[in-house]
Amino acid sequence: MKHILIPVDFSSQSWNTALCAINLYKSPRVHFYLFFSEELDYSADHETTICEPPTQQLTSWVKKLDKVIAGGQTIIPLTWKSDFIGGMRKAVADNHIDLIVMSTSYPNIFSEFLQGSHVREVITRLKCPVLIVPREFYCKSPEQVVLITDYNFNHRAEPTSIINNFVQKAGAHLNVLQLSKTGNALSETQQTNKSFLQSAFDSIPHSFHFVMEKTMDEALQFFIDIQKVDIVVLFAKNINLSENILFSPALTEEKDYHKNIPFLIVHE
């Protein structure tokens, strides 16, 4: 049984995110939980107009989504009257949540002026995989997934298993990408960590790559363009990479992966 938590604020973007989660998980035995917090300040992440009581809107959304889910799937409403993160933490624990799917209105979800961003809070305060859906993403089943790593920390079986299952269920190809400014040979520790990943992903189509002599933003955008990447995966534990990729400013108005590439954040 798969349990997926979707925080909603009744905006059109939130609705599209719910549809995206349903589109990505079409198999039976999936519970989708629509989470609404009565004390959530939605203006921090969305422009939202609530024209009827939230509980009534939540009921309406459940009825509409019931018509589009696959057989053997369930839509479950959850409401919370206290703080947003407290409610999310309880929902994750009580319902054995496997994945949180959230939307964001901003090209860069970690820019400095978003200190109150609910997406940021979920990523940094809840140890649960999070799929971040940007505002310009057209939801489809991914064909090319890229995992960003520098091989600088020891991996564990559980997070790599999450990535394995995600890629396998999508029928996608996993690209493991090292972003390097120098192109120096891997240290003994890095090589050990790389070997672990090679073994962990042995059962799915995968390949290893590196891009050098570019900034991390430029290197990732280059690889996304070349490989037609659909989703980027990051280990939350890899703080240096997370900051450089997620905290980075937008590239240009024409090309910026923050706008249209989902990020899957996996906790070690």
Image: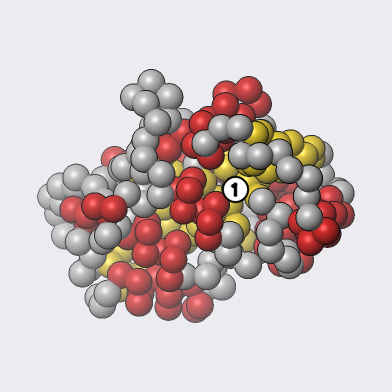
Front in this rendered view, residue 197 or 211: 211
Q: Is residue 237 left or right of residue 211?
A: left
Relative to the observer, which residue lies in front, 118 or 94?
118
| Residue 27 appearing in the image | no
Q: Secondary structure at mark 1?
A: strand
Q: Amino acid at mark 1?
A: Val
In the rendered image, which quarter contains the N terminus? bottom right
Q: Tell me: 130 left or right of 151.
A: left
Residue 41, given in percent of the width and then of the height, sits at 20, 61
- Identified at 48% across, 48% down, the residue is 244
Colouring rule applied to residues = secondary structure
Can residue 122 be seen in this snapshot?
Answer: yes
| Rendered residue at 66%/51% (across/down) | 150
| Residue visible at 18% across and 53% down in the picture | 43
Question: Could you say where residue 33 lies in the image, as x and y percent from the top left?
Answer: 45, 62
Q: Nearer the viewer, residue 96 or 180?
A: 180
Q: Mark 1 — residue?
A: 233
